[in-house]
Image: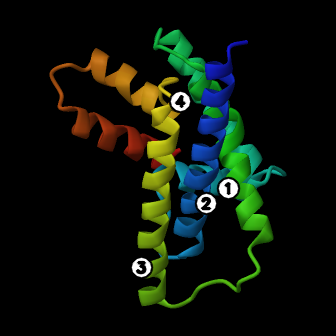
Amino acid sequence: MKKDTIFGWIRIIAGLFIFAFGVHLTIFANIGLAPWDCLGMGLSYHTPLNYGLSMTLIAVTVLGIDLLLKEKIGYGTIIDALLTGNFVQLFNSINPLPLNNNRWLGIGIMLVGFVFMALGMAVYMKSEQCCGPRDALLVGLGKRMQKIPIGIVEVFLWAVVLLV
């Protein structure tokens, strides 16, 4: 294996770890969940799986759909599918703070979470090893619905995820 590949994988893992901390903060903010997190939490509430395993199962399923759609899959896509939900679960499990019940504090925590998510994405994307499985799904759907703006396709995808 090339040194660049190993360094790229380390960058991917570091970026996903930072991103996962941001996701943890958005969940800990306790003022609402993003659609994919809502699906993962719902699955964890109604099965023996925890959030991390639920998100991994969802990501691997989406990865399968990406392959069926013949979307480009890279090392980053696979590593993302296997690690991100479990990293978030790690942060959720070791969080020593009580549940947040303050709306304004929650807004602040969520905004800080967004900063960590953006930072993690920047580190992850620098490796140039493809996008995550959910993003690949969005791209695949966008290619098949060319007459519909990609933003509308994304809202439609989120709506389906929330309904599930």
Q: Is residue 159 left or right of residue 143?
A: right
Closer to the camera: disc 2 or disc 3? Answer: 2
Could you tell me residue 61's position as x and y percent?
63, 27
* Cα distance in 3D space between marks 4 and 2: 19 Å
Q: Earlier in the sequence, mark 4 or mark 1?
A: 1
- Circle 4 is placed at which residue position? 133
Q: Earlier in the sequence, mark 1 or mark 3?
A: 1
- Circle 3 is placed at which residue position? 107
Q: Earlier in the sequence, mark 1 or mark 2?
A: 2
Q: Amino acid at mark 4?
A: Pro
Marks 2,3: beta carbons within 8 A: no
Q: Amino acid at mark 3?
A: Ile
- Circle 1 is placed at which residue position? 88
From what the image shows, is residue 97 above or below residue 80?
below
Dot 4: element: helix
The part of the image, by quadrant, that contains residue 148 is top left
Q: How many marks?
A: 4
Residue 22 seen from this side: yes
Residue at (68, 50) in percent of width and height: 43
Dot 2: element: helix
